[in-house]
Image (spheres, helix red, strand yellow):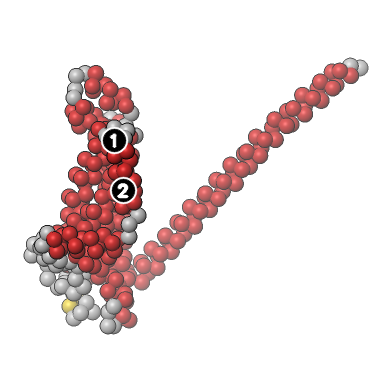
């Protein structure tokens, strides 16, 4: 027969095992439930995106043709194509990149590498985060006051591109600073230990490692700028301009503003509705192409750094 004290000890051990296992099972169930909610949220977002893209593709694919992509509009945009709008969007996006990239990267380098822990960098970061939440129409009004009127650029590609550059700047600075923070300190310390200066260590060790994140943030910011309507509405966009811009000081057509007018302000909305869907599909494909370019550049730079 088993002594009573051993039975009591065995029972206590079994009870302790049960009580120790049950919290783990509870935590596992909570984790599975949380993952299920995340997957359902992701599925809902994907379904919404696929539905929107399917709706645009089914209603706008019939309007897309070689003539639609390569010719100028005719008869109040009831005939012809959207080539000036495509070219104007590309020009404005290029000026936006030229304006936002150097200022954004250099500001991020200063904040992450040179600025000391004081109130001034905190105020700068606070201002950047606040600027990221400012509505785009406010940037448009500011662009009119600064670039169109004060600097006398007029309503032009240059004024619109610089305005979108200001709109993209907070995203570029934030993404670049986060990319610089992700670089290990050993990269900097190793270069300094070999006798390199601070700027040389940043230029040769830190920036190449942070470049994938910087490029990704810039292109994602440009994708947002390419679809904005309010800033270019005041600074140079025109609905019907069937000729190509002669210089950066000319007015231009752009896909988002062109789509806005056709969908809401055109005198024959039912007549141009297929063209509006085709324009929306082209704009979506342009933005998706920029996003895929960001992912491709990021993976390529990562493979190059690993190699």
Q: Is residue 183 left or right of residue 43?
A: left
Determine whether the residue tagged by mark 2 lies in a helix, strand or loop.
helix
Position of residue 272 measured from the top left corner of the image (x, y, whole percent): 28, 78
Quadrant where the N terminus lies?
top right
Image height of 69 relative to 290, above or below = below
Residue 54 is situated, as x and y percent measured from the top left of the image, at 40, 65
Tell me, for residue 112, which label it has, or none. Answer: 1
Quadrant into which the C terminus falls:
top left
- Residue 42, placed above or below residue 83: above
On the image, the x and y values in percent for residue 217 come to: 30, 46
For image coordinates 65% across by 34% down, the residue present is: 24
Judging depth in this view, the residue of 276 and 180 nearest the camera is: 180
Task: Please state which of the two labelled residues, at mark 2 or mark 1, is closer to the viewer.
Answer: 2
Q: Where is residue 126? Give x, y as percent.
A: 34, 46
Q: Secondary structure at mark 1?
A: helix
Residue annotated with mark 2:
127
Left or right position of 41 against 74 = right
């Amino acid at each position: 027969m088993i002594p009573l004290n051993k039975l009591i000890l065995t029972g206590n051990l079994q009870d302790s095992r049960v009580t120790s296992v049950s919290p783990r099972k509870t935590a596992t169930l909570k984790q599975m439930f949380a993952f299920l909610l995340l997957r359902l949220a992701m599925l809902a977002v994907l379904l919404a995106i696929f539905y929107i893209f399917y709706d645009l593709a089914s209603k706008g694919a019939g309007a897309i043709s070689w003539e639609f992509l390569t010719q100028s509009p005719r008869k109040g945009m009831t005939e012809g194509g959207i080539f000036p709008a495509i070219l104007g969007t590309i020009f404005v996006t290029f000026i936006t990149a030229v304006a936002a990239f150097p200022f954004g990267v250099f500001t991020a380098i200063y904040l992450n590498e040179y600025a000391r822990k004081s109130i001034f960098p905190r105020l700068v970061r606070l201002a950047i985060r606040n600027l990221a939440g400012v509505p785009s129409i406010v940037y448009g009004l500011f662009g009119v006051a600064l670039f169109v009127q004060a600097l006398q650029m007029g309503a032009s590609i240059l004024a619109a591109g610089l305005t979108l550059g200001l709109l993209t700047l907070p995203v570029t600075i934030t993404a670049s600073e986060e990319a610089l923070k992700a670089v290990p300190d050993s990269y900097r310390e190793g270069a300094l230990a070999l006798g390199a200066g601070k700027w040389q260590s940043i230029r040769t060790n830190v920036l190449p490692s942070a470049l994938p994140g910087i490029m990704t943030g810039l292109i994602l910011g440009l994708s947002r700028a390419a679809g904005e309507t309010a800033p270019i509405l005041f600074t140079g966009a025109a609905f019907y301009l069937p000729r190509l811009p002669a210089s950066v000081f000319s007015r231009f057509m752009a896909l988002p503003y062109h789509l806005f007018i056709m969908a809401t302000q055109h005198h024959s909305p039912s007549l141009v509705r297929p063209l509006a869907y085709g324009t929306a599909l082209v704009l979506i494909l342009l933005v998706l192409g920029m996003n895929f370019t960001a992912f491709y550049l990021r993976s390529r730079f990562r493979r190059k750094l690993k190699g």
